[in-house]
Image (cartoon, rainbow, N blue to C red):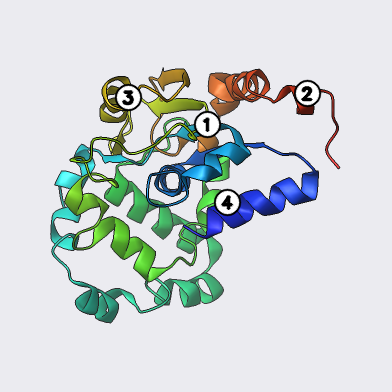
Amino acid sequence: MYDLPALVDWVCLATGYDKIAFIGHSQGNGVGFLSLSLGHRPELGDRLSCFIALAPAVFAGPLTHGFPFTILRKVKWKTWQRIFGVLDYIPLMRYSYDYVPPLIFSTMGYTMFAFLFEWTDTNWLKRRKNKMFRFTPTPVSSASIFWWCGEGGFADRQCTMDVDLPRWWDEHFPPLAIYYGGRDFLVRAEPLLERLETKENHIKVIRSEKVPLSEHCDFYWAADAVEWCFSSFMEDIESTRPASDASSEPQ
């Protein structure tokens, strides 16, 4: 809850803008939804001209009902630390990155993620796959992965928020655009859209777009990602740009 406000403050300071647009994918927008919620930093919304959420990570998808999530959600933190590490998640990966030949490392990375998340390379340029997975997986916090997969986490609760609360966000929330994939089984956008219509209808939803062919990470990995929705991102940003910033140039 500290990183995003600090990031927004720094970018506003560096550019001279009072407000900036925020685009987040999956966990990136999940942090945004949490940061803007009541009890955290709802006033952060006053610094954002719009919030573009790609594959919004608020409600878990059907994939989290199967293996290995059904096992991981039962693992307590102390046990998790012994198995997956205290600081880095699976520290062995860091050493593998340094010493395992790139082609072998990237092949193992793709195979692991394809199994865990049912990703495929259907929409990718095949020649880029080894390059992408040379850097995936990357070092990440073990505690962060526990929050998403371990006991009491996202996969266990099926939602990042408390579904029993009457309201999650207030009037500070910026204009919201949601893009989600028709072949994304890790998260679900439909319950979020329903919530926005029924309990959070004070939020201005400027766009809700389903990309039928998109899997979870295809918003940036698919060969056709630019044609699918990048021009729409620009429309969302420009349509919500403050009048005071419309004619100004970034510093």
Are the residues at dot 4 and dot 2 in contact (C-beta closer than 8 Å)? no
- Label 3's element? helix
Residue 24 position (above or below residue 112): above
Q: Which residue is mark 4?
A: 131
Q: Relative to 220, does residue 80 appear above or below in the rendering? A: below
Marks 2/3: CA–CA distance: 30 Å
Q: Nearer the viewer, mark 3 or mark 4?
A: 3
**Where residue 170 sits: x, y (%)?**
41, 35
Give the mark nearer the N terminus: 1 vs 3.
Answer: 1
Give the x, y percent position of residue 45.
53, 39
Q: Which residue is mark 3?
A: 193
Calculate the distance from the C-alpha at mark 3 to the C-alpha at mark 4. 35 Å
Front disc: 2 or 3: 2
From this viewpoint, is residue 126 visible?
no
Residue that numbered label 2 is attached to: 246
Question: How far is mark 4 from mark 2, CA to CA?
Answer: 38 Å
Disc number lying in front (1 or 3): 1
User: Reading the chain from its start, which is encountered first: label 2 or label 1?
Assistant: 1
Side of 93 relative to 149 (left or right): right
Residue at image mark 1 = 174
Q: Earlier in the sequence, mark 3 or mark 4?
A: 4
Q: Please give the name of the residue rendered at 45% of the width and 44% of the height, measured from the top-left corner.
A: 36
Answer left or right for 165 relative to 201: left
Residue at image location 40% in from the left, 20% down from the top: 210
- Residue occupying the point 40% across, 47% down: 34
Which of the marked residues, 4 or 2, is nearer the chain's N terminus? 4
Q: Please tell me which of labels 1 and 4 falls first in the chain.
A: 4
